[in-house]
Image (spheres, rainbow, N blue to C red):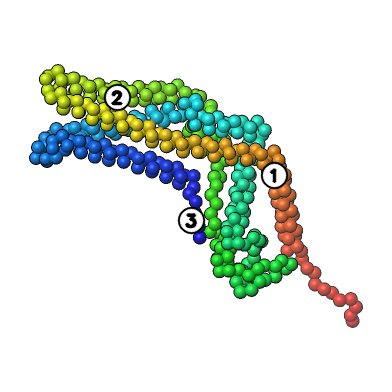
Amino acid sequence: MDEQPKTFWEKAKSAFNRAKLSRYLSFFAVISGTVILSLYQVGWDPFRIGWEVYVANTALLLFLGIYGLFFGENEGGNLFKTLITGAFQTARDEFLDRVDDVVDKGYADALPDYIVWRYQTDYANACKMKLMSVRVFDSSVLDLNKDDLGRLRTAPLKVGEHYYSQLSEEQYQTIIDIQDGKLFVDYIDDYTFFLNDEDGGGEQQVTRVKNTPKRKEKITWKQRLTRVFMILIVSLILAGFFKKAWEGGDVETANRELVTRLTDLIVSVASGINIARLLNLEDVFVLKFKASYLGLFYVSMENKSFVPTNYEEKAKKEYEEYEKKQAEEAAEVVDQNVVKLPFIAKGGN
């Protein structure tokens, strides 16, 4: 049996885990570099290490690394999503164009039926491909019951007017697996997913517009605080360097600390930007998938390869079946209440 493919949410979780792994590796690289550089400076002699100073420097570098990582991720995410010529905006524009095509044609109401139809079509195609992989080219073999399939393991078979070749053990097991529902084809049954811009957070447009002032204030303060902290951190690093140089301290040591801390900060920011890039690629993939799906839906509606359900006709049919059932039940009640008179033969004494 084939391994089941990952769902959309499993792929999203996998991408998130990859991002977390990148963070952990970045933390490890920063800490390892700090330890190695510190030990190298003192000649690798643990008895010559000023442990209080060492722990303080390590804690500072770790803080710089963590903050720089999240700073880079936040700023990189904003950059990748707002860059007009970037992949995200290009994919988003394509997606919104597909949404406009579907909505303008009045096809949006048919999307739920299309999702079911598309799943059934994809599943049927997956079954055919699976059968072809074991050299079974007649998909009607799936309609046979298990008794007939059991007989096909030893000899060819005629069922009705249809003839079937003998099956190998691999072919037989593949057919049984398909009949038992072990062939998995994933799909997304929420039609709103295909019509909403993911960047909108699932929020309705009117609600989003009404909440614009609050959202702008939140964004503004978030960006301000992020940049203030970054300015403060760089200022503290530079201030420590100039203080040591001004007081006539070891300028060479001050230079090393300055370079180490700035390098730590810059590398961490670059790592955060790389994480944002990877997450952005996942968002781009989602938008492209939605655009492609809506494009196929639009073409299927245009060329009539998919005909949506007429809900009024469906309701009419359900009502007629209900009326018929009511009439049958009423007739049955009447039959049960009919008094059967005893039979009286004609004639007699």
Percent position of residue 73, x then y: 37, 32
User: Compared to 334, does 213 lie above or below?
Assistant: above
Q: Which residue is mark 3?
A: 3
Question: Viewed as shown, does residue 248 lie left or right of 274?
Answer: left
| Label 2 packing within 10 angstroms: few (<14), some (14-19), many (20+) | few
Of circles 3 and 2, the one toward us is: 3
Q: Which residue is mark 2?
A: 229
**Residue at 55% of width from left, 47% of height from top?**
187
Along the line of sight, which residue is nearer the eye, 242 or 202? 242
Q: Which residue is mark 1?
A: 305
Pointers 3 and 2 in contact (CB under 8 A)? no
Task: Specify whether residue 226 is in view.
Answer: yes
Percent position of residue 28, x then y: 27, 40
| Label 1 packing within 10 angstroms: few (<14), some (14-19), many (20+) | few
Q: Earlier in the sequence, mark 3 or mark 2?
A: 3
User: How many numbered tags mark residues here?
Assistant: 3
Q: What amino acid type should be assigned to the residue bearing mark 1? A: Ser
Pointers 2 and 1 in contact (CB under 8 A)? no
Q: What amino acid type should be assigned to the residue bearing mark 3? A: Glu
Percent position of residue 184, x then y: 53, 54
Identify the element where label 2 is drawn: helix
**Residue at 22% of width from left, 26% of height from top?**
258
User: Compared to 302, does 211 lie above or below?
Assistant: above
Identity of the residue furthest to the bottom in this view: 349
Give how far apart the Cα atoms at labels 2 and 1 are: 58 Å
Task: Specify whether residue 202 is in view.
Answer: no
Along the line of sight, which residue is nearer the eye, 286 or 324? 286
Identify the element where label 3 is drawn: loop
Q: Earlier in the sequence, mark 2 or mark 1?
A: 2
Q: Earlier in the sequence, mark 1 or mark 3?
A: 3
Give how far apart the Cα atoms at labels 1 and 3 are: 31 Å
User: Compared to 224, does 124 lie above or below?
Assistant: below
